[in-house]
Amino acid sequence: MTTTDAGPRLDGPSPHAGAAPSARHARARRWSVAWPLAGLLLGYPVWWAMGIAPLVWTFFAIPMCVQMYRRRPIRLPPMFWIWGLFLALVAISAVMINAKAPGTIPVNSGGGNYIAYGLRLLNYLSVTVVMVYIGNLTEAELPRMRLIRWLGIVFVVTVIGGLAGTVFPHFGYDSPIKRFVPATLQGIDFVQQFTHIATAQVQATLGFPRPSAPFEYANAWGNNYSMLLVWFVIGWLLYASNRRRLAALAIGAVSVIPLVYSQNRGVWLGLALGVLYVAVRLALMRRFGVLLAMGLAVAVAGVLVVATPLQQVVTNRLGASHNSNDLRGSLSVTALSVGAHSPIIGYGSTRSTIGSNKSLTIGKSPGCPKCGNRVIGSTGQLWLLLVAQGYVGALLYLLFLFQGVVRYWRDNSAVGIGGTLVLLLGLYYSLLYTSVVSPLAITLMGLSLLWRNDDARRALRAAQDAATPAAGQDRWSPALGAAGAGSSP
């Protein structure tokens, strides 16, 4: 391990390389160019409080598109054709929205289905724009470390929102946008994420409220928490002043409270798998000092859970898993069956079961609005894609994320390890949580950072090759090979 003025780094130059933080003009230029991304991320709690958080990605994608159009040609990430085919399939699947899938209840032919589909398509396109936009900014316009710290700030906001949902779980209010939504649509679950703002989801069967702020659902909170944690550790611990590190340690310790109260078993397992992944990568690199520090952090978090009332929350959640597992398993099997009937383009959107996982005769009624007719595709991104875009759409989606892991696997920098971990978490969470808006955006931002980091590594190797005298040291000598193998964070 080597060190810089920003702290320890893993195999590579400082992430501040290429930037000119001391130059006011350069700093002003970075803000003038990257302002849409800054407004999107740093203003996220405001957008959530206004009830427009799911739409704000589209709003800020517009000026991003304008900027990229003016600076043509536009660069695309490697293997983008896979993602392009996926987006095309999402668009084509609109023709199936009103088609009846075997074994499901008939589709309501009203406009609500098209509104939900249109918003989902816009979100897919918007997060794609964000990914491409980040990749087209230069290091002078938006240093990688600046973006990483912005994501760290979003993590801090996530922790604050989680604490608010834990302490004030019943706090909520109607958003300003509700007055513009027709009364006939306000009862739809999908629409309520815009019309009613709440700090937590209260589910009586679990015994404790589940914090969700500043996101729409508790599952989205946990999903985003775990991926943003990666960038928080890099930007606020690995590359930080001592003061920032102390603040990060305090924030990390406090974040355990909403993490436990979120009762996201999938996130708990995801964090464990993430720690294992990073531990293996560090061990292979012989970074035993960093590995020891990570082990101590995990041990402290474990003590906070075991030695406090948080243990009871974990015990209760694990004890209440039976019904949830049965429902998830039933809906997953149904999604596989529905997708098999339209494997090429799917059905455009979700479908609902006939009855419940217990009996075909159990369905929604005025006396029991929550009974039966479960939404097929609501228990994970993979299952949503199988129903909405078929087997082909699901394959394209997963393949694009997986190729990013394979392509950047050999990047041993902090960004390389962190970015591939984010992609792996995105693949894992596709089994458990839908990730159409913010979780997918955070995943694709991780891919953008890997893409930018790879460009920096290539530029570093080219500069080193150019600096090597033609008749001098061989370019594959141990000294230059060691330097060239390093990667920029």
Image (cartoon, helix red, strand yellow):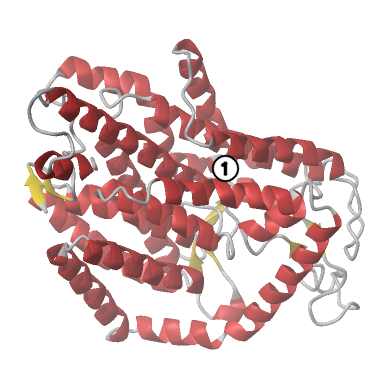
At 18% across and 28% down in the image, what residue appears?
465
From the viewer's side, name the closer residue of 99 and 279.
279
At 22% across and 22% down in the image, what residue appears?
27
Screen quadrant of the N terminus: bottom left
Residue 255 lies in quadrant: bottom left
Residue denoted by label 1 = 54
- As drawn, 2 above or below 287: above
From the viewer's side, name the closer residue of 147 and 38.
147
The amino acid sitting under disc 1 is Pro
Residue 97, image x, y percentages: 84, 45
- As drawn, 416 above or below 292: above
Residue 229 lies in quadrant: bottom left
- As drawn, 45 above or below 130: below
At 74% across and 48% down in the image, what residue appears?
389
Residue 76 in sight from this viewpoint: yes
At 69% across and 75% down in the image, what residue appears?
329
From the viewer's side, name the closer residue of 265 and 333.
333
